[in-house]
Image (cartoon, grey):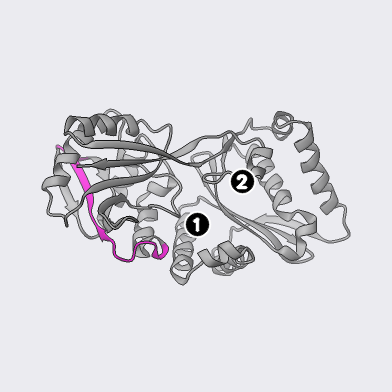
Amino acid sequence: MDFTLHTTFPDELETEWNLLLDRTVTHVPFLRHEYLRAWWQTRGGGEWPQASLALVTARQEGRLVGIAPLFHVPDYKGRPALLLLGSIEISDYLDLIAQKEDMPAFLSELLPFLVSAPLPPWQVLDLYNFLDSSPTLEMLETAAQAVGWRFSREQLQHSPYIPLPGNWESYLASIGSKQRHEIRRKTRRLEGSELPTRWYLVTEGDQLEKEIEAFMGLMSQDPNKAHFLTPAMREHMHLAVHCAFDRGCLNLAFLEIAGHKAAGYLSFDYLHRMWVYNSGIDMNFVQYSPGWVLLGYLLRWANENHIYEFDFMRGDEKYKYRFGAIDRFVIRVVLEK
């Protein structure tokens, strides 16, 4: 394989990159070229201000066969490290990019290349947010053993998801009578009130900026999320939402009560899966359980619109399991020379 080190983001690779991603071992929206370009523009919403790009591509007979989207930075222990673009806080699932049949050869040549490449000194490959089902994990361990590197693996957050049957009543039947009753009771309570209500998906581009700001306003009512929404993070959110809208995979939903936005969900509708990215609630309407009601509407919409998986992504909040979520995990891998 012919390897190239990129120290500026390779805008010209967008088409090739995304075509390769279509065939790769882990196809997730956080690995798309345009998403990682936006992530790099803000250095992860300000998470890594000292980062320098160390992105590696591999070709065979001119064909792009592998991408290691890496950057160089002092890690949280102060060690010079190589991390995956997207790490750590705001990109739920990451991986290296290659077809399954090409990944072993790609990794076996990538590791020696990273030693010889003109990079700043580094000590570890610190790779976050692999899905526990990724075949890259075992292949990385094999490649590390072949060059005598230490390999360690750590289970990080829960990442629950709901397999959807494609039918609302079948879904409700799958979650048990108590939760089914709660969904119906809370929905009827709101719909039976005298307050006008509606829920909708954002579809108009000329309203997008206004809707993004409204969504972040809902997020900000949670003190932890308000702290999270620094100026750099707000910039990243704008870029990521516009990126999803432009590619036709944005699912930004609001529930309005009496003309006011009471709840919002930001998700990606991608590959017949719903990737639930963040949410916000107006605490003035908390007595109507607007988050639960809107989530119920979204699950019904997803069942009726050919979504086969509703992915809550990272976090083990109890409500996810009450709606029928099944556990899986994201994994961190560390390779030390």
Residue in the image at 28% along x and 32% along y: 141
Q: Amino acid at mark 1?
A: Phe
Q: Which disc is residue 94 wearing?
A: none
The relative height of residue 203 versus residue 112 in the rendered view (above or below) is below
Residue in the image at 82% along x and 53% along y: 190
Quadrant for the C terminus, please. Answer: top left
Asked whether, in this view, residue 185 is left or right of residue 133, the answer is right
Read off the residue under disc 1.
245
Asked whether, in this view, residue 228 is left or right of residue 47, the answer is right
Q: Give the class, few, some or many, for how many residues have Cα within 10 Å of label 2's Cα (few <14, many ≥20).
A: few
- Which quadrant of the structure image shows residue 42? bottom left
Asked whether, in this view, residue 325 is left or right of residue 258, the answer is left
Query: Sequence-wise, which precedes: disc 2 or disc 1?
Result: 1
Residue in the image at 81% along x and 38% along y: 181
Q: Give whichever of 168, 113 is nearer the camera.
A: 113
Residue 305 location in percent, x, y?
62, 40
Q: Is residue 146 magenta?
A: no
Residue 258 location in percent, x, y?
79, 65
Q: Amino acid at mark 2?
A: Glu
Mark 2 and mark 1 residues within 8 Å of each other at the beta carbon: no
Quadrant for the N terminus, please. Answer: top left
Read off the residue under disc 2.
317
Q: Give whichever of 110, 206 is nearer the camera.
A: 110
- Which quadrant of the structure image shows residue 207? bottom right
Residue 189 location in percent, x, y?
85, 51
Q: How many marks?
A: 2
Q: Give the class, few, some or many, for how many residues have Cα within 10 Å of label 1's Cα (few <14, many ≥20).
A: some
Q: Give whichever of 7, 22 is nearer the camera.
A: 7
Q: Which residues are magenta?
A: 45-64
Q: Helix, strand, or loop for circle 1?
A: helix
The nearer-to-camera label among 2 and 1 is 2
Q: Is residue 56 magenta?
A: yes
